[in-house]
Amino acid sequence: MVIVLYLIDEKKSTYEDPKVCYTKGIGSSFFCKQLKLYNMKLKELISKDYMTAFKERNAVAKNILSVVKGEIQNNEKNLLTDCLSDADVIKILNKIAKPLREIVEKTNDNESRLQLEILESYLDKQMSREEIVVKVNEIVASGITNIGLIMKEFSTLQVDRKIVSEVVKEKLK
């Protein structure tokens, strides 16, 4: 995984490099000047962002990232390993984000929404309900009508399995 960050000098107001990426996360948005971090693992990035949040006294980011770091350490201890893969860390992030999504949907709690935004900055973008409906329609049009086979088509995609299941059940009625 290669992460490229860009920083704007305080004196400049324009971007010289067209490949400028916006890094949200830890409370303050920032751009970095062509600082390349090669092969930085997701776990290391979370630890680095935790320290940044700690130094900036960003309580929301610090709290949620400490929960993530704790889960990572628990999994490492249970698996008797020093370093989890990025795929394992993504599973942990999804596990923590799922109840936050439900809270945000039900109560629209501001702190939970901020925590969810921080977690989602580490995750790939999930498919929307509309994109899922289009994909399910394509699969059903190809002749597959078994729920298990349709769900298997979504196994490698970044989706909420609950939404996929709902859409499939609606389509096959």
Image (tube, grey):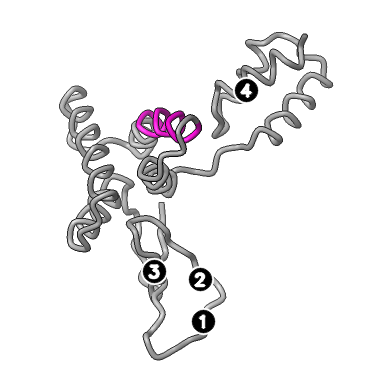
Q: Give the range drawn in magenta.
A: 94-105
Given residues 79 and 159, the one toward you in this image is 159
Task: State the mark number for residue 164.
Answer: 4
Q: Is residue 115 left or right of residue 52?
A: right
Q: Are marks 3 and 1 in contact (CB under 8 Å)?
A: no
What residue is disc 1 on? 15
Taking the magenta stretch, the answer to whether it contains residue 95 is yes
Q: How far apart are marks 2 and 4 (CA)?
A: 34 Å
What residue is disc 3 on? 30
Q: Is residue 22 above or below residue 128?
A: below
The main secondary structure of the magenta stretch is helix
Q: Distance between the residues labelled 2 and 1?
A: 8 Å
Quadrant of the image for the C terminus? Answer: top right
Are there few (<14), some (14-19), or many (20+) residues within 10 Å of tag 3?
some
Task: State the mark number for residue 60.
Answer: none
Task: Report the residue at 76% width, 11% height from top.
Answer: 172
Q: Distance between the residues labelled 3 and 2?
A: 11 Å
Residue 129, x across and y down, in percent: 66, 32
What residue is disc 2 on? 20
Q: What residue type is labelled 3?
A: Phe
Q: Are marks 4 and 1 in contact (CB under 8 Å)?
A: no
